[in-house]
């Protein structure tokens, strides 16, 4: 999308450090923040925040 960490942070109304911590799996965002990021990237929350081995399985 061509967004920088600063851009994402500004859009989500959080600090750049928060975005860095999420990227490095050192911070689990609130549901509200997770929803903002999912909407920004036009992806389901579980696609962004679940690691492959944790992803829910389709029935």
Image (spheres, helix red, strand yellow):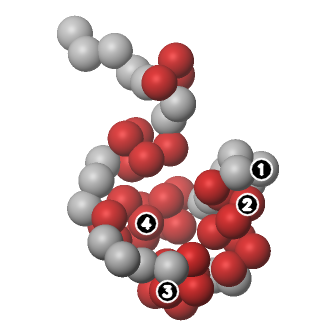
Residue found at the very far top of the displayed protein: 59
Q: What residue is at 49 percent from the left and 86 percent from the top?
A: 7
51 vs 30: above or below = above
Residue 50 in the image, given as x and y percentages of width and height? 50, 35
Which numbered dot is residue 8?
A: none
Q: Who comes first in sequence, dot 2 or dot 4?
A: 2
- Image position, residue 30 (x, y; %): 61, 60
Question: What separation in Å lies between label 1 and label 2 (alpha carbons)?
Answer: 5 Å
Report if residue 37 is visible in the image. Answer: yes
Residue drawn at x 50%, y 66% as measured from the top left: 32
* Distance from Cα at disc 3 to Cα at disc 4: 12 Å
SS assignment at label 2: helix
Badge 4 marks a residue whose secondary structure is: helix
Closest to the observer, 16 or 38: 16
In this rendering, the label closer to the viewer, 2 or 4 = 2
Total labels drawn: 4
Front-lying residue, 57 or 8? 8
Picture coordinates of residue 43, whole percent (x, y)? 28, 53
- Image mark for residue 26: 1
Residue to which mark 4 is pinned: 37
- Disc 1 and disc 4: Cα gap in Å? 16 Å
How many residues crowd around disc 2 within 10 Å: few (fewer than 14), some, or many (20 or more)?
some
Question: Residue 16 appears in which quarter of the rendering?
Answer: bottom right
Q: Name the element at disc 3.
A: helix
Mark before the other along the chain sequence, 1 or 2? 2
**Image mark for residue 7:** 3
- Taking the image as shown, residue 11 lies to the left or right of residue 23, namely left
Q: Nearer the viewer, residue 59 or 50?
A: 50
Dot 4 crowding, Cα within 10 Å, few <14, some 14–19, many 20+ = many
Quadrant the N terminus occupies = bottom left
Identify residue for label 2.
21
């Amino acid at each position: 999308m061509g967004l920088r960490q600063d851009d994402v942070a500004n859009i989500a109304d959080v600090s750049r450090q928060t975005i860095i911590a999420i990227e490095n799996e050192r911070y689990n965002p609130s549901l509200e923040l997770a929803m903002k990021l999912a909407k920004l990237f036009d992806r389901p929350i579980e696609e962004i925040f679940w690691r492959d081995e944790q992803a829910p399985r389709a029935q």
